Amino acid sequence: MSKSTRYKVHFTPIYYRIRTLTCLSKNKIMASKDFTTTILVDKTPTEVFDAINNVRGWWPGEIEGGSKKLNDEFTYQYEEIHYSKQKLIEVVPDKRVVWLVTDSRLNFIKDKSEWTGSKISFEITKKENKTQIRFTHQGLIPENECFDSCSSAWTKIINNSLHGFITVGKGLDDLQ
């Protein structure tokens, strides 16, 4: 990377992050508004990593398949509203997990495959004596029809269910 390339990160309220990449040599700005939320827990990165990979413990709905190792695939079904299939494309113990959504059917919007091709990532970092989880759904942007309802659901799932599963061993049973 040349010395003339700089990265700037700007945060907006909890619903999404705007990442701005400024290339000073070419004067170009590229922006992405992927949905992001961050939580901080009083657990080790290993405990957090293990909890994230136990998807059945914190993502309310029906889950089938593996969700722990690289190239594992699992499906998620919530009533007749949401179906998606995820493949683990990056698994770095205690640091990062990335899912690729290979198929989706969101029955509450016009483009039912809106999630297909998007990526869902969990960045795990140590912050003093706590662990931070930065969740990003790359491709879930404000221009998408499902952004409002999906970002609201992810906020509840990550900030309540995943947080509860990591800290007290119990996630939400339902999204209602």
Image (spheres, rainbow, N blue to C red):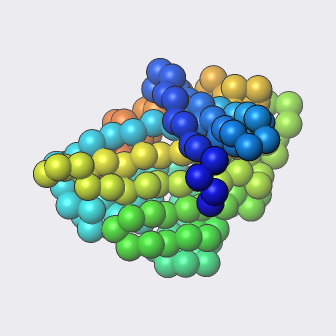
- Left/right of residue 155 with respect to residue 101 in the rendered view: left
Q: Is residue 127 above or below residue 88?
A: above
Depth check: 16 or 62 in front? 16
- In the image, farthest residue toward the left: 129
Depth check: 135 or 62 in front? 135
Name the image quarter holding residue 126: bottom left
Name the image quarter holding residue 141: top right
Query: Picture coordinates of residue 109 (x, y %)?
Result: 79, 30
Q: Is residue 58 above or below residue 47?
A: above
Q: How many marks?
A: 0
Q: Residue at x 79, y 41 (%)?
A: 26
Depth check: 140 or 31 in front? 31
Question: In this orientation, does residue 47 appear?
Answer: yes
Q: Residue at x 49, y 28 (%)?
A: 11
Query: Picture coordinates of residue 52 (x, y %)?
Result: 39, 59
Q: Is residue 92 above or below residue 139?
A: below
Q: Residue at x 43, y 55 (%)?
A: 123
- Left/right of residue 48 with respect to residue 14 in the rendered view: left
Query: Picture coordinates of residue 43 (x, y %)?
Result: 19, 55
- Left/right of residue 125 with respect to residue 78 in the rendered view: left
Name the image quarter holding residue 99: bottom right
- In the image, farthest residue toward the right: 110
Query: Picture coordinates of residue 152 (x, y %)?
Result: 53, 27
Q: Residue at x 33, y 55 (%)?
A: 125
Depth check: 9 or 109 in front? 9
Question: In this orientation, does residue 57 appear?
Answer: no
The image quadrant where one finds the N terminus is: bottom right
